[in-house]
Amino acid sequence: MDKKATRESYGEALCKLAEIRPDLVVLDADLAAATKTGIFKKAYPDKHFDCGIAEANMMGVAAGIATTGKLVFASSFAMFAAGRAFEIVRNSIGYPNLNVKIGATHAGISVGEDGASHQCCEDIALMSVIPNMTVINPADHVEATAAVLAMADYKGPTYMRFGRLAVPVFNDPDTYKFEVGKGVTIKDGKDITIIATGLMVAEAIEAGKALAEQGIDARVINIHTIKPIDREIIEKAARETGKIITVEEHSVIGGLGSAVASVVTETFPVPVIKIGVNDVFGHSGPAVALLKEFGLSAENIVAKVKAAL
Amino acid sequence: MDATLRKNLEITAAKVRMGIIEGVYNAKAGHPGGSLSVADTLTYLYMHRMHVDPQNPEMEDRDRLVLSKGHTAPALYSVLAQRGFIPVDELKTLRKQGSRLQGHPSLGKCPGIDMSTGSLGQGVSAACGMALSGKISNESYKVYAILGDGEIEEGQVWESAMFAAHYQLDNLVFVVDNNNLQIDGEISKVMNPYPIDQKFEAFGWHVINIDGHDFDQIEKAFNEAENVANQPTVIIQKTTKGKGVSYMENNVSWHGAAPNEEQYNIAMNELRAHLAELEK
């Protein structure tokens, strides 16, 4: 299977988006080479503006541009976009409900060697709690591309999370359809449901296959939109499989697991077991080894499923 | 400035000040001090300078104003009322539940508001974004941002100052309302931001120092700003916090407090007497 980092998909998709939306403006904060908005900058130098190492101002500038009707993306690492600039995103983008798209790359533990200062595992929680904000966490190249293009006519503040690590491209570009707020059932199953988001979806698929070989029929669902979350697909999974395991490269507090648990408790209470970063900081190391260490792997999903059944 | 125009602006500014007191008194809360200090400049901008249309508040080529010192919303609402965006009587609903006149300006709630503000240091960045957008598509509009002198202690202000100079936003004007007081006291004692003019100069701005209660100087400054190319302009205006109400002038305790009935009557009588003098 081909592998590609969703940040690459993001940079490339922005170029395609500019063909649909000639009014597109892209902002970055001295990280264009890393966030891959540099790809866009090369193609559209007049539509790309570097704000320097000043994320707070960048978010406010994005808000101001949005008031004039243009489509604007503001990019940085998740840590700075959602973390450092949180209050600007809240007060200057979320509160006035402005059409700003935040393209946040280098999310999660898989940032790798940079260590905990840059491994943001809190961004989904921080962004989800802001009223008006949509939160999207694409799983692979195909989904990331489709999600960015969907922003051509999706209005409102939106946080989009992309990764640094190259991950398997499992969606078929010819048939894949992206719809904001709609979960995707990747594999049906009746014994338990694995609900994953972002780069954990590929691991969940692997886990589903491994479990099938051992006679366990696990349903695998991809939730690319954490907010608004697809309540229907979650409630159905709770009713039909009786147990849910969530998997995310994010804190177990305030992310996918919390969102799923909250839907389940309101609709059809069943056990929800959360795999994620367990309220700890990360540390330096190779991305793949770190993911393994923090239990963000197909093997750990299999182990947790078996323990739950 | 033409004498008739100046007289008219002075008359409107007096009415604006009465609206500020009316609003804050009825709300039993709000920020009269900084509202009164910035009232003359806001009056000049909305009544004379800015290309705006109360009948079409979202007109695409309108000039924009971001009240970055959003707590002085009573002044902005009162000016918008004088310009016909909202009824003057509505000023009495300031800060009340269900009112369009939120404690701090809220985009989309009240016609004529170009940006939600209130958290200091943020409005200036939005103003930069509006100005940049105008440059990108070659629009004719101007963007004005009004800052408090305490507000410039926020680091984001200087991020935005760097940005505006870097992108040569000559369609952007900042006004620093230098009334010399912030909540905890004199700005030089709380966290000294002086010399303000030299700081902006060092950031690459065209700097103009004026008396913010003198309409001739205000007009001259905005005319000068209009003719500056490839550089943003900042107008640093010396003002009096609480201007126009004797007991509020230069008194920091009126930063964020409402007058009681007796104080309200004193304030309104003073402003009414001043208005009558002007209308003679």
Image (cartoon, coloured by chain):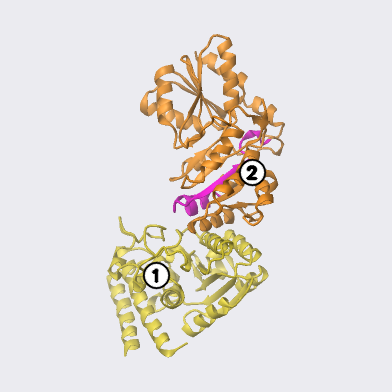
Chain colours: A orange, B yellow
Q: Amino acid at mark 2?
A: Gly
For the magenta stretch, what is the residue range? A84-111
Residue B103 drawn at (x, y percent): 38, 60
Q: Is residue A118 above or below residue A292?
A: below
- Name the side, left or right, on which A135 lies relative to B14: right
Q: Which residue is mark 2?
A: A11
Disc 2: host chain: A
State which quadrant residue B234 falls in: bottom right
Closer to the camera, B259 or A91? Answer: A91
Residue A103 drawn at (x, y percent): 58, 44
Residue B78 drawn at (x, y percent): 36, 70
Whether residue B176 is visible to the viewer of this picture, yes or no, is yes
**Separation of residues labelled 1 and 2 (CA atoms):** 40 Å
In the structure shown, which secondary structural element does the residue marked by tag 2 occupy?
A: helix
In the rendered view of the protein, which quadrant contains the C terminus of chain B?
A: bottom left
Q: Is residue A52 above or below residue A79?
A: below
In the structure shown, which secondary structural element does the residue marked by tag 1 occupy?
A: loop
Q: Amino acid at mark 1?
A: Asp
Q: Which residue is mark 1?
A: B53
